[in-house]
Amino acid sequence: YTTLFRSHEIKYKGYVADIMRDGEIIEIQTRAFNAMRGKLEVFLADCRVTIVYPAVREKWLNWLDNDTGEIKSRRKSPKVGGALEVFAELYKIKSFLRGPNLTICVQPVDVEEYRRLNGWSRDRKKGSTRAERIPTGVGEPIYLREPRDYAALLDGLPDEFTSAELAKTKKITRGLAQTTLNVIVHIGAVECIGKRSRAKLYKIAEMQERRYQP
């Protein structure tokens, strides 16, 4: 992804920032958001910070002969990515999300992934090694700044809904749906209003125009 986003590392207050310009720091992070806690605490004290999360929208898999490097097959991955994937990582920095200086940018990307046929299964695919992942296209970025930006990701749901209904509507796992709601409730975009049988019941919260404060 560094080729796509052309990041330029800059040292700032004992940490390294991917990009710094006009008082704004841009961090490109695909995983391990928990490793950013230290730098976020320092950066957000006096800078605007945007975390760019490349979310795979479409992926083509290329299987390589482990000895020759020849492409043996190519197919489109059946797994479809989406913006809600970012919440598995946002959960790790939940305490920073209410601050006025932080913006999350979910950047949809299309990729060509190359994997070596060196796995342990009969077809050598399970447990295989990824050789390279090359971005081939980008979609329209999604910016998460205000509670209403987070709430907009839940379009298509009924007025009152459970985590199971969120998972079904957005075609994500139940675990990711629960994590997503945990984060969105924390930032004030959704509220828990009780229970339906044994399941917690949620609805989109009424939100003010101005941004929340820490």
Image (spheres, grey):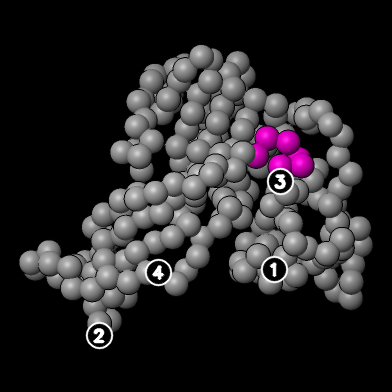
* Tags 3 and 2 touching, CB below 8 Å: no
Q: Disc 1 marks which amino acid?
A: Thr
**Disc 3: which residue:** 150
**Disc 4: which residue:** 77
Q: Disc 2 marks which amino acid?
A: Arg
Tell me which label, 2 or 1, sits earlier in the chain.
Answer: 2
Closest to the observer: 72 or 182?
72
What range is drawn magenta here? Answer: 144-149
**Disc 2: which residue:** 122
Q: Disc 3 marks which amino acid?
A: Tyr
Q: Disc 4 marks which amino acid?
A: Ser
Tell me which label, 3 or 2, sits earlier in the chain.
Answer: 2
Tell me which label, 3 or 1, sits earlier in the chain.
Answer: 3
Disc 1 secondary structure class = helix
Above or below residue 115? Residue 26 is above
Tell me which label, 4 or 1, sits earlier in the chain.
Answer: 4
